[in-house]
Image (cartoon, rainbow, N blue to C red):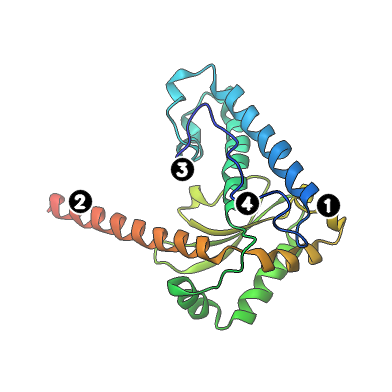
Amino acid sequence: MIQHYPFQVFPLPYLYDSLEPYINMETMYFHHSKHLAAYVDNLNSLIGPYPQFHDWTLERLLLENQQLPEDIRTGVWNNAGGVYNHELYFAGMSPNATELQGKLKDSLLLDFGTWENFYNSFFQEALKLFGSGNLWLVADERGKLVILPLPNQNTPLPKGLSPVLVLDVWEHAYYLEYQNLRAEYIHSWFHIVNWTEAERRYQNALFDNVLRYGDCLRSQQQVH
């Protein structure tokens, strides 16, 4: 769903207790209704006085951040990123078992060799990501899958990478249940990954890349 000002906190696609025992109800409630809501409120407060940006989507606020007034630029970067990242994180989990399949499975096995290689690489990167941030599985312009750690609420969008999967490793994502045991949280999260949603995002990334390639060819033909 495309969002623009005033941004909203959309309901979760499942109940707060639906991800138990992997993520408990208290964690989900505070994460969604407090932390995400704070990012939404802050973003609306920053954009509100500037009607010329009211029709800008989250993606545009991030991709064209340097066009914003200097006094709100950093705040919008952080809070738009917070909204964007949380929405993808919450939608990327499911209380119902899903299966890695389709083009995403084919590419994951091609790029990492085996499921075990992917799992271990993703786990280790999430474990060692220092401080607060998110760990991403992204697709580049060729559809190649890459594991990308990013600090704070940075997103892969300015790097020209398409998000497929994201794991929130800020402490507020797991501390109420797992305290400092990030490794247990990572293991648990893999039980509730929504691979159906991840496949949809990957398919969209491939389609967008085809469109960009077509636009590039047409531009070259016009030049010649």
Q: Where is residue 144 in the image (x, y as percent from the top left)?
A: 46, 69
Mark before the other along the chain sequence, 2 or 3 = 3
The answer to whether residue 188 is above or below residue 107 is above
Q: What residue type is labelled 2?
A: Ser
Residue highlighted by disc 1: 175
For the residue carrying disc 3, how many other residues have a C-alpha within 10 Å: few (<14), some (14-19), or many (20+)?
few
Residue highlighted by disc 4: 14
Residue highlighted by disc 2: 219
Mark before the other along the chain sequence, 2 or 4 = 4
Q: Position of residue 118 (x, y in %)?
A: 61, 75
Q: What whole-number distance in Å separates the C-alpha atoms at marks 3 and 4?
A: 17 Å
Q: What whole-number distance in Å separates the C-alpha atoms at marks 2 and 3?
A: 30 Å
Mark before the other along the chain sequence, 3 or 1 = 3
User: Is residue 154 visible in this depiction of the protein?
Assistant: no
Q: What residue type is labelled 4?
A: Tyr
For the residue carrying disc 4, how many other residues have a C-alpha within 10 Å: few (<14), some (14-19), or many (20+)?
some
Give the mark toward the camera: 3 or 1: 3
